[in-house]
């Protein structure tokens, strides 16, 4: 049995303690030397071996470090220090489940260790094991009842565990205690509002109101207190008092939708109920008289009115915005275009306004001439209106007129670029956005849009150089700084560009950079588990925990994860067909890796001792080789399974899961994906082809047990009957694309080409978009269609999008 720390000689005990202090000070190299000094005399001292392994793990020698820590545990499996050290390393490597197991083992040997208890309590919250977090924090509170953070941590654990009554009792007990150090006024204010929230969540609205009145002198967040009061009065069915409270809030901020909705509810009105719309409009009119400067109240009547009432409200809003020169008018009312009648009415209204200004320089109900800029903004709006409906030529004519009337106004150039993009002229869109950016090079939004447009034409290097304008001159490594900015839109667009260029390795690298941003969001919450209770920012802390539960629902994450999985599937297909993808090497002088110049210059400077010598993550695998050489199907499976857990309501998730499981010959999971997609959308265009492909796989896969094929076929027959892969392709372009993809997967390139070449035809006019035709073009090229067939497709597509340069 290995000796414990207390059994070491006095000198080695002192060295061991100093090693731990060096770890706390992040001086890992010095700590490694100290631990090696102990091991020279006691080479089999388990706890020192574990500590040495910890230092090695933090010095990027992880494999060696884990090996030493495991060796230390074998020597002394009862040591709380060894288990604690192992847990610390697992936690720093984001292996939270394994870290929890290590801490639990450490507590078996040292159940009163406050440091371990605090760390494992945070990990329990991190992994949403709230019942265990409650137990752990109850123990901490019992050990030190005068430490506020322990009480507040216990209260938040009860809160997240759904026991609001116990959380209230904990807060009340904490308030009665002799807490050291005492809380400042901001902490007291936050704690009081948090307790009131708990009372509200517990369903006792009257008590919450009484408590709210009681704590008023302690509150610093006056707006938060007033919002609580209004909401509680409404929940307590004291609508008259609640109306007065919401009126008070509207005087503070008449643009707040929650205040307006609350005021409506006080009047017994539901803004989503059609039967209440007349009354809602009447109340909105009353509020408009009280708050005439409110843009939100000016817009709301358009949401709830129809016919003549809509026309009157729209005219009032439009003339106000046109006179003020508000560029965002179309963006504000675009939501109304979901109603075809309202969209058409808005277009007619602005056309009428433009005609009046051209003919008389004034509106019909006005006696004074309007500013010349009114016609500019009429054309600006109408260009977006016609672009929305796909009339790009008319839109371009109008926006050119707007530009001629005011050549120095930047906004029309931006809209022109957008119209050209929608029309299929990506190069023209890029050049127009560049011209707009040159008018105000200090505008970050314009530069951002220009970068995005450059990436759409695959100018990845130029886009990167432009993006460097956002990076500080003194940044030690500018390319790494771009990654650290966590701009997921840039990472995804850059990944798409590399994917179009056929560079799957770099595409995967950028998709994984975007994915890692959301992993960082998830991991970073760990620091708040102790910080928030220490600073008593409890309401915000609970909001963070609830938000973190939805972080992977972000569209940017789902886009990156699906695209990465599709890249892995492409790599797997290429390997299966003996057409292995080879990572494309980058020339050394292409990338400015350091602030001292290019990569080659940077290496020279580093050799001379100039500049930053640290090897940054972005430099380690510039070509994405590790992603290409990984187990492609296994990596695709990880992404698909995660998407199934966080984005199960998205049909694309189950289409992806189908593709992954089918290649891995997991046919029951394939059927599960088909059924999940059917449950979401029984008319999804991919369903017929998915059923056909599963049936074909069952027919051709002799390695799959025949006895298991029977229930699978029976389920398919029961749920779908006889299905043809071309079902729906006569009417829907989406069905054509889905069928073509499946035909290509089954090796029927000629059949796929015969379908795809028809997609620009008039019978697919409904639902046909530029992006869908571009997808058809990509699939047609993949099908092996000859040049004449592809040229015929391009010519027909040009009749649909005559301004396009991408066919």
Image (cartoon, rainbow, N blue to C red):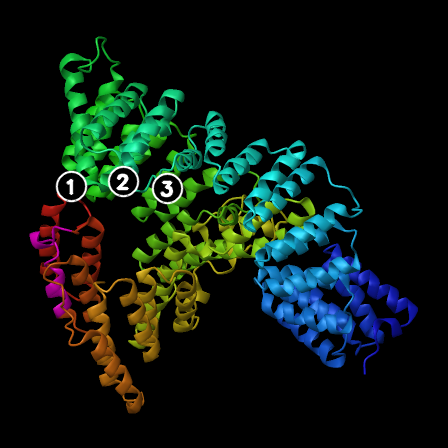
The reply to whether the C-beta atoms of the residues labelled 3 and 2 are less than 8 Å apart is no
Label 1: element kind: loop
Residue located at (39% from left, 34% from top): 267
Q: Nearer the viewer, mark 3 or mark 2?
A: 2
Label 3 neighbourhood size at 10 Å, few (<14), some (14-19), many (20+)?
many
Q: Which residue is mark 1?
A: 803
The reply to whether the C-beta atoms of the residues labelled 3 and 1 are less than 8 Å apart is no
State yes or no: residue 756 in magenta: yes
CA separation in Å, label 3 and label 1: 22 Å
Q: How many marks?
A: 3
Residue 221 in picture, x, y percent from top left:
60, 34
Instruction: Identify which residue, 157 or 56, lies in the foreground.
Output: 157
Label 2: element kind: helix
Q: Which residue is mark 2?
A: 275
Q: Which residue is mark 3?
A: 451
**Which region shows up in magenta?**
751-766
Instruction: Identify which residue, 195 or 540, lies in the foreground.
Output: 195
CA separation in Å, label 3 and label 2: 48 Å
CA separation in Å, label 1 and label 2: 46 Å
Specify the farthest residue to the right: 10
283 up-or-down from 496: above or below: above
Mark 3 or mark 1, earlier in chain: 3
């Amino acid at each position: 049995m290995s000796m414990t720390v207390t059994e070491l000689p006095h000198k080695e005990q002192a060295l061991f303690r100093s090693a731990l202090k060096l770890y706390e000070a992040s001086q890992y190299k010095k700590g490694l030397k100290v631990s090696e000094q102990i091991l020279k005399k006691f080479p089999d001292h388990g706890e020192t071996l574990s500590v040495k392994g910890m230092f090695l793990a933090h010095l990027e020698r992880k494999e060696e470090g884990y090996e030493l820590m495991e060796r230390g545990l074998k020597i002394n499996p009862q040591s709380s220090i060894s288990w604690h050290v192992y847990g610390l390393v697992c936690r720093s490597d984001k292996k939270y489940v394994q870290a929890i197991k290590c801490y639990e083992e450490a507590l078996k040997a040292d159940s009163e260790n406050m440091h371990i208890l605090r760390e494992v309590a945070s990990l329990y919250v991190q992994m949403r094991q709230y019942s265990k977090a409650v137990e752990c924090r109850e123990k901490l509170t019992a050990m030190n009842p005068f430490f506020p953070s322990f009480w507040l941590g216990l209260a938040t654990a009860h809160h997240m565990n759904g026991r609001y009554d116990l959380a209230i009792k904990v807060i009340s007990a904490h308030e009665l205690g002799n807490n050291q150090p005492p809380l400042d006024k901001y902490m007291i204010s936050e704690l009081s509002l948090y307790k009131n929230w708990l009372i509200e969540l517990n369903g006792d609205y009257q008590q919450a109101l009484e408590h709210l009145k009681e704590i008023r002198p302690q509150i610093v967040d006056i707006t938060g207190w007033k919002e609580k009061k209004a909401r509680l009065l409404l929940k307590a069915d004291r609508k008259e008092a609640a109306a007065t409270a919401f009126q008070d809030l509207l005087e503070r901020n008449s643009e707040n939708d929650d205040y307006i909705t609350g005021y409506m509810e006080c009047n017994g009105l539901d803004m989503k109920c059609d039967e209440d719309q007349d009354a809602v409009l009447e109340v909105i009119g009353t509020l408009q008289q009280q708050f005439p400067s409110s843009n939100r109240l000016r817009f709301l009547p358009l949401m709830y009115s129809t016919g003549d009432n809509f026309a009157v409200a729209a005219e009032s809003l439009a003339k106000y915005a046109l006179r003020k020169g508000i560029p965002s008018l179309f963006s504000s009312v675009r939501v109304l275009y979901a109603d075809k009648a309202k969209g058409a009415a808005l277009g007619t209204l602005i056309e009428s306004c433009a005609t009046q200004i051209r003919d008389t320089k004034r509106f019909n109900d006005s006696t004074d001439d309007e500013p010349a800029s009114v016609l500019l903004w009429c054309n600006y709006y109408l260009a977006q209106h016609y672009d929305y409906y796909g009339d790009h030529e008319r839109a371009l004519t109008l926006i050119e007129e707007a530009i001629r009337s005011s050549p120095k106004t930047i906004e029309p150039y931006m809209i022109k670029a957008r119209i050209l993009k929608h029309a299929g002229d990506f190069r023209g869109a890029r050049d127009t956005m560049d011209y707009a950016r040159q008018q105000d090079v200090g505008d970050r939004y314009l530069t951002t849009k220009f970068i995005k447009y450059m990436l759409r034409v695959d100018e990845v290097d130029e886009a990167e150089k432009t993006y460097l304008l956002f990076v500080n001159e003194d940044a030690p490594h500018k390319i790494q700084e771009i990654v650290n900015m966590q701009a997921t839109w840039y990472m995804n667009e850059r990944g798409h560009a590399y994917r179009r260029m056929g560079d799957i390795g770099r595409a995967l690298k950028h998709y994984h950079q975007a994915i890692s941003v959301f992993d960082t969001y998830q991991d970073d919450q760990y620091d708040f588990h102790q910080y928030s209770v220490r600073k008593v920012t409890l309401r915000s802390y609970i909001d963070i925990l609830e938000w973190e539960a939805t972080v992977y629902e972000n569209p940017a994450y789902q886009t990156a994860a699906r695209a990465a999985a599709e890249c892995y599937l492409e790599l797997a297909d290429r390997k299966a067909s003996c057409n292995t993808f080879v990572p494309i090497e980058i020339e050394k002088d292409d990338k400015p890796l350091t602030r001292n110049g290019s990569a080659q210059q940077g290496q020279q400077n580093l050799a001379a001792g100039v500049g930053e010598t640290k090897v940054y993550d972005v430099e380690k695998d510039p070509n994405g080789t590790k992603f290409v050489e990984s187990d492609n199907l296994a990596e695709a499976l990880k992404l698909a399974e995660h998407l199934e857990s966080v984005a199960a309501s998205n049909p694309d998730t189950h289409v992806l899961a189908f593709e992954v499981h089918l290649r891995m010959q997991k046919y029951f999971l394939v059927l599960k994906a088909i059924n999940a997609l059917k449950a979401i959308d029984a008319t999804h265009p991919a369903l017929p082809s998915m059923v056909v492909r599963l049936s074909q796989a069952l027919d051709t896969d002799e390695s799959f047990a025949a006895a298991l094929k029977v229930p699978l076929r029976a389920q398919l027959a029961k749920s779908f009957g006889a299905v043809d892969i071309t079902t729906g392709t006569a009417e829907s372009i989406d069905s054509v694309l889905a069928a073509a993809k499946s035909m290509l997967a089954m090796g029927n390139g000629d059949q796929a080409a015969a379908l795809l070449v028809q997609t620009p035809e008039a019978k697919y006019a409904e639902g046909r978009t530029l992006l869908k035709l571009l997808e058809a073009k990509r699939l047609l090229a993949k099908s092996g269609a000859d040049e004449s067939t592809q040229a015929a497709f391009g010519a027909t597509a040009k009749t649909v999008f005559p301004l396009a340069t991408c066919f």
